[in-house]
Image (tube, helix red, strand yellow):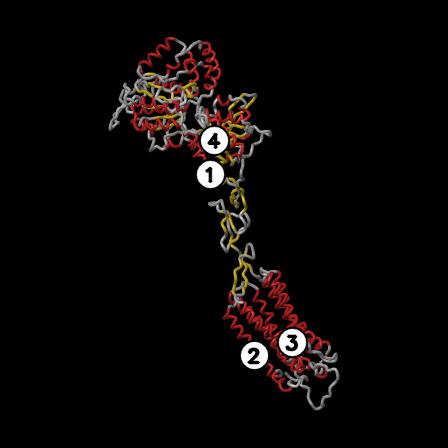
Amino acid sequence: MVPDLLLCLSFGYAAALGPTCLSAQFRRPGDYIVGGLFPFGTDTVNLTARSEPTFLVCERLYVDGLIWALGMKFAIDQINNSTSLLPGVKLGYDIYDTCFEPAVALQPSLLFLTQNGTRDIGVLCNYTDYQPRVTAVIGPHNSDLSLVTAKLFTFFLIPQVSYRASTEKLSNTELYPSFYRTVPSDKNLVEAVALLLNQFGWNWIATIGSDDEYGQGAQELFSSIARNHSICIAFERLIPTDLADPTAKIQLEDVVRSINKTDVNVIVVFAFVQPAQALMEYSITMGLSKKVWIGTEAWILSNTLASIPNIQNIGTVLGFIMKVGTVPGFQKYVADLFTSVQQDKFCQESREFNHLMNPDITDTHCKHCDHLTLQDISSTLSRPQIQPVYLAAYSVAYALHRALGCTHRACPRASVRPWQLLHFMDTLPFELNGQSFRFDQSHGTNPGYKLIFWSWKNSTLTYVPVGDYGESLYVNKSQIQFHTADQKRPTSECFVRCKPGQFIQIKGFQLCCYDCTDCPENSFQNPEDSSTCTPCLKHQWSPVRSTECYDRSERYLFWNEPVTIVLLMLMAITISLTCLTAVLFLKSLETPLVQASGGKVNLFALLTLLLLCLSCCLYIGKPSNNLCVIQQIVYALCLNGCFSTFFVKSLEIALVTEFPHCAPTCLPWVTQRRAWLLVALCLLTECFLCLCYLHLGPDYLLLDYKSLPTAVLLVCNTKSWVAFALIHGYNGCLAFICLLCTFMVQTSGKKYNVARGITFAVLTYFITWIFFIAMFGTLTTVFRSATQIGTILTTCLCILGTYYSPKCYIILLRPDLNTVDYFQNSTTEEPEEASPQTDNKPDPLSPVPQ
């Protein structure tokens, strides 16, 4: 194809010696006329200066628009030459310039609505039988113009097929039921752009759009889609389309300065060629650093934009263009046409055709085309994007084929109203150059996009395909060479993509600029709310940066824990020592030592110590409310049973040492069988206090969720400290009374000091409790139960060691001291001088049966 084009160029250049009649090629009579709206020119005069509705003149030729118009002409000529599509029927065409301006496009649009053969638009109640000048309209090329013209053509239900308008608004078939397009809507394009940004990890970008329907609509669509793809738009700006406006320069400079102020390295541009070209020129002039520019078909293939001086310095350019197939024979057709328009005979025929159409209609066709050569359009012709125009013309032809009821041999000549084509436009699938086409529910087509990359080599621009987008996006990243110092992919991130278990923490004033913060313990990140962490329920826990919560396990002092096993071994030792001591005292019950220590009362004290040791088992295993109550009551009663025996013996010692004159009278109440009454009274008092404890507020089971990170701690908690003080304070009072009655008692070295054992036993009890309170207040885990067990066993061992072990030593190892003489007067305080005693008066503290 390229050699053919070069050959045609050589002939065309040789033939182009003077003005041609190319401007006369855009009108042809026919049985059915198809209107065309194409941008032949650009840059109209300042519209604000118009004071009268005069004719508007376009100052410059827009080559792309000319190529599109030639594409429509080529398609209709090809249809007319077909022997199967519309045999026996000729399509005519009437193509006009839109000049990128609605004010220019309205004039031919109104002409299309006139009654056939006139310049009048009938005002009727019913337009069912109304026959306008054209059967269908191809164009216009952009969204702004299409929204204006579509309102006109929709009223008459004239099929309008655009080859470039992509705004999503035109997808509303209720508002625009007769509008069709052979390109995808902007919704597909912005989705592709968002996926491209995600592929490269660019989530901090700027979007710039032209101040028209295309730019505004695409920006609005992209903003809504970007949020779903975690893309943050640093700023959105619109650039003017009217570059002659005095404020246009200020706006463009402000846009470039805004880009410089932010950290964005990626800019998405939704604009047509002229605004995009102005933006690039100002970016180069103002020294904007190299960026990644993502463009669309509206400007990405523009030769005028690519020819800007130093355009290579703007950075990396990527863009999406619609996937289009080639149109066989088009380049040769254009080359032949440029040769033909040099011939007088051909030109004369063309002018006659124009005169047959309607000589009174103002000619608003391509005014600049007659001085154009094939060489002038060669660069644009080498990469034609005319398939959408070609397809639009054929869609009308196929609809007309169905509406007329044509066969492959002939078409009946019948009157067809434009609205009658709509049904066939909606339903017809047709094949063109081996491809099948049809309009979807929104009256559009979606062939997909190609991703191209601007590759510069020796100041020569090449468009390199690097990916495509259909149902998904594919990018060949190895073919993209980023125009940076190290040719590595630039970063454009205000935030990192949050990992599971992290929530968004906003930074500064940009709501979409944030840090990712780990969810703390006992909370999780809910996928439905990425801005905060949801606390776990009370009975659940979670680690740092978690996406779910887990049920807490129950924690208490288990039977198989090492510390429990050690305590149980210690308890077994303590129980064994207590039992051995009890057996030894039982066998030596009638000896002077046992009788002087209290006799059978010692066996009762040892029994309560044994029960106190066994109560340690209440602190092991899963606690309950009842178990918490029993722990305190059993401890208080068992300890009270032991201390009550000490209390009786302490009163006996106090009477002998401090109140010797009262001793003969009072001693019988604290010795022999009456001593059991005091022991019983002490126990009954403790039982009464236990009842008060149950009434005021017993201990209860507490589920502690704070002490352990992954488990719930089951502990017994004090409900009433008054009740707690009653039952345990009473034992403390008994111990303190025992201490007061015994700590000052002295004996000679030849006598046994019974009081000393009670004193040391009580002192070790107080010391143990001081350490217990200090440790119990600082421990919050299962070691609290272990501490309670240790305190009980320590108390028992201290009592055994300080009170009973010296006596066991005498019984086992010093039986020679276990005599009446050694224990007689053992609690009598030694005077400074011996006082005479009568031989016939018995000693009240001599060992007697208890």
Q: Is residue 715 left or right of residue 275?
A: right
Quadrant position of residue 178: top left
Using the image as rendered, state which of residue 829 and residue 195 is in the foreground: 829
Q: Amino acid at mark 1?
A: Arg
Residue bearing the label numbered 2:
681
Quadrant position of residue 20: top left
Q: Amino acid at mark 3?
A: Leu
Mark 1 vs mark 2: which is more N-terminal? 1
464, above or below 2, in the image: below
Tag 1's secondary structure?
helix
Discs 2, 4 touching: Cβ within 8 Å: no
Residue 227's label in the rendered image is 1
Mark 1 vs mark 3: which is more N-terminal? 1
What separation in Å lies between label 4 and label 3 (alpha carbons)?
95 Å
Q: Is residue 530 left or right of residue 771?
A: left
Q: Is residue 105 left or right of residue 690?
A: left
Mark 4 vs mark 3: which is more N-terminal? 4
What separation in Å lies between label 1 and label 2 (alpha carbons)?
82 Å
What separation in Å lies between label 2 and label 4 (alpha carbons)?
96 Å
Q: Residues within 10 Å of mark 3 (few under 14, many from 20)?
A: some
Q: Amino acid at mark 4?
A: Ile
- Could you say where residue 187 lies in the image, as x and y percent from the top left? 42, 33
Tag 3's secondary structure?
helix
Quarter that holds the C terminus: bottom right
What separation in Å lies between label 4 and label 1 (alpha carbons)?
17 Å
Residue bearing the label numbered 4:
208
Tag 4's secondary structure?
strand
Q: Amino acid at mark 2?
A: Leu
Residue 740's label in the rendered image is 3
